[in-house]
Amino acid sequence: MGIWKMRQILKKIRTNLKRNQIGAVALEYALLAPLFVAFTYGSLEIGRILMVYSALEGAVTESTRISITGNIPAGYTTVEDYIKEYVENSIRDVGVSTGVTISMKVYDSFSSIGDEEPYTDTNGNLTYDIGECYTDINSNAGWDADMGSSGAGGEENVMVMDISVDLPYMMHGVISAFSQSETINLSTTTAVRNEPYGGVAWEPSSNVICS
Ligand SMILES: [Ca+2]
Ligand SMILES: [Ca+2]
């Protein structure tokens, strides 16, 4: 084999090596790029969720701090109006303007939270049935599995506030392909007893209904 032939062979080997190196880099990039994008998106999404949840908890803390005093800030008719607006503004500050649900229920004690309205279980099936007599604690003319009455209540009442947000994912179209949901639900609940500020307390009704 002549020297010229040897040079040609070596040149061909070097060219193939370069092609292989370029191919390897392209393959590595093709494999790692999606992971990098997913990691970056996941980090941003988690940070956003934590930010909204933090705003949610801050809003609940601040609004209940006001409500237990019984003071209605200037410009509001009821403390419920103030709380709703305060929470909605707090959430809006972190980019959420829809999907917010605020529930306030009042009870006469902490031990009553979540209890059902008492009823006479005539047929003994451990379930309320239409026609069985019940005490309409929250005065809404219907039997309820949760006796809480809507609103912030009065002095020394116990108020339970629940705030729920359906937060759309930033890439909701992509996420929904995996989770079958375009939103994540964030919620927080707190229970407080109002101070004895001298107002009118909410009283549970003792009205018995048998229809
Ligand atoms: Ca029954
Ligand atoms: Ca009721």
Image: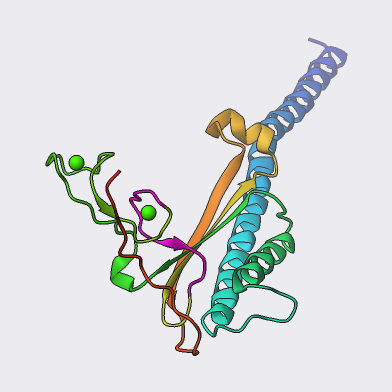
Is residue 113 shown left or right of residue 201?
A: left
Nearest the viewer among 93 and 208 is 208
Q: Which of 65 and 37 is in front in this view?
A: 65
Q: Residue furthest left?
A: 124
The segment highlighted magenta reads 141-153
Q: Which is more toward the observer, 151 or 100?
A: 151
Residue 195 horizontal/vertical position (percent)? 46, 86
Quarter of image, ligand 1: top left
Q: Percent x, y for residue 86?
A: 67, 69
Q: Is residue 16 magenta?
A: no
The residue located at (68%, 81%) in the rendering is: 73
Q: Is residue 115 left or right of residue 87?
A: left
* Position in image of residue 85 (x %, y %): 69, 66
Name the image colouring: rainbow
Give the number of callouts.
0
Q: Is residue 146 found inside the magenta-colored segment of the image?
A: yes
- Quadrant containing the C terminus is top left
Taking the image as shown, residue 189 lies to the left or right of residue 85, namely: left
Q: Which residue is drawn at 43% across and 73% down?
A: 202
For the view shown, which residue lies furthest in the top direction? 1
45 shown above or below 55: above
Q: Return the x and y of residue 193 as percentages of the image width and height.
A: 42, 79
Quadrant (top left, top right, bottom left, bottom right) of the N terminus: top right
Residue at position x 78%, y 24% in the image: 19
Q: Quadrant of residue 169?
A: top right
State left or right for residue 186 relative to residue 149: right
Q: Height in image: 104 above or below 77? A: above
Of the pair 204 and 86, the residue shown nearer to us: 204
Q: Which secondary structure type mostly characterizes the magenta part of the structure? A: loop
